[in-house]
Image: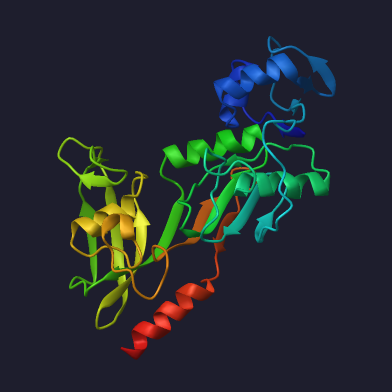
Amino acid sequence: MELDWQVKEPVTSLKRFLTNQGISHRVFSDLKQQGTIRVNGQVTTPAVTLAVGDHVAVTFPPETADEAVAVSHEPITVLFENRDWLVVDKPAGLNVVPGPANRTDTLVNRIKGYWEAEHAENLVPHILTRLDRFTSGVVWVARHRLANSLASQLQAAHQIDKRYLAVVGGRLEADHAVIDAPLASDPTGYNQMVSPTGKPAQTEYWVQQRFATATVVAVKLHTGRTHQIRAHFASLGHPLLGDALYDGPVTGINRQALQALSLTFKDPFTDEQRQFTSELPADWQTLIHQLSEE
C-alpha cells in the first residue's frame, strides 16, 4: 500500500514530516525496516533532507494473515468499506475476537474470510471498537497499520463519537444526566462495580422513551471502561433488560438490551466527516413492541 503527500511548509526532518501526517514511532520503525520511502520519485533513506514542494511517498508491505487465525466464511453485514476502513454491523451472540470459547467463528475470523475472498492486500483486521458478545451494532475496523495508528490517535484525543441505545429496567426520572462514577473489577465475579478506587468513568444519557416498566436511553461514553454502560445503569438501580450478569430483568429479550447505534469521526485521510448507523435487530424491535403493549 502506498501513501503520498506534498511538503507544504519547512520541516526539520523526514521523521518529523511523517509524524505530522500521523505516522507513529512504531509505524515509522516498521516503515524503515520493511517499507520503501521515495522523495520526488527516488528511493531514499530516512536521513533525507526535505524542501517545500517535495513529494513524499511511502510504501508499506502487505500485512499477511496470521496462520493461527482460522478462516470463517459465515457472512458479515458491511456498512462501509474503502482502502482504509471497514465498518460492520455485528449481530448479538457473535464474539469479536477469538478466545478460548470460540477460535473459529468470531467477527475476526469472518473478516479474514471476507478479505481472502476479495483477494485483499492486507489480511490483518485491526479492531478499533470492540463490543461484548451479546451487544449488537457498529464495529469499526482499520484495514492497515497506518489507519490503526491514526484511529488510535483520534480515540486518545476523544474525537470519536460513539452512541448507544439501551433499554433499562424501571423509569428513569431525569431526561438527561451524566453518570460520573469510577469502575473497578468485582473481586467476587466477572462484573464491574462502582468503587472509589476504580478508574474514572463517565456515561452520558438522554431518555428517548418511557414505558411502564422500562426506559429507552441514548448513551454516549466519555470513557471506555469494560461493561461501562451495563455497570453504571446497574449502579443506579436500573440494570439493562436481559442483562443477567447485572441482575437485569430477564424479560422480553434473551440478552442485554444494548445496541452500538452509531459511530462518527473525521476521516484523517480525507478530512471527510463520516457517520455510520446500525439497524435495530429483530429481537430489539420485538422488545419495544412488547413494552408498548404493557
Which residue is most to the left?
196
Q: Position of residue 13 (x, y in %)?
A: 62, 15
Tell me the colour scheme of the image.
rainbow
**In the rendered view of the protein, which quadrant contains the N terminus?**
top right
Question: Which is more toward the observer, 211 or 80?
Answer: 211
Q: Is any part of residue 83 visible from this angle?
A: no
Identify which residue is drawn at 42% across, 67% down: 254
Q: Is any part of residue 265 visible from this angle?
A: yes
- Considering only vertical position in the picture, is 11 above or below 101? above
Question: Which is more toward the observer, 254 or 36?
Answer: 254
**In the rendered view of the protein, which quadrant contains the C terminus?**
bottom left
- Considering only vertical position in the picture, is 261 above or below 14? below
- Considering only vertical position in the picture, is 227 above or below 21? below
- Considering only vertical position in the picture, is 99 above or below 72? above
Which residue is most to the bottom?
293
Q: Position of residue 120 (x, y in %)?
A: 79, 42
Identify which residue is drawn at 35% across, 87% down: 292
Which residue is most to the top?
47
Identify which residue is drawn at 64% across, 44% down: 104
Identify which residue is drawn at 25% across, 79% down: 213
* Occupied quadrant, residue 215: bottom left
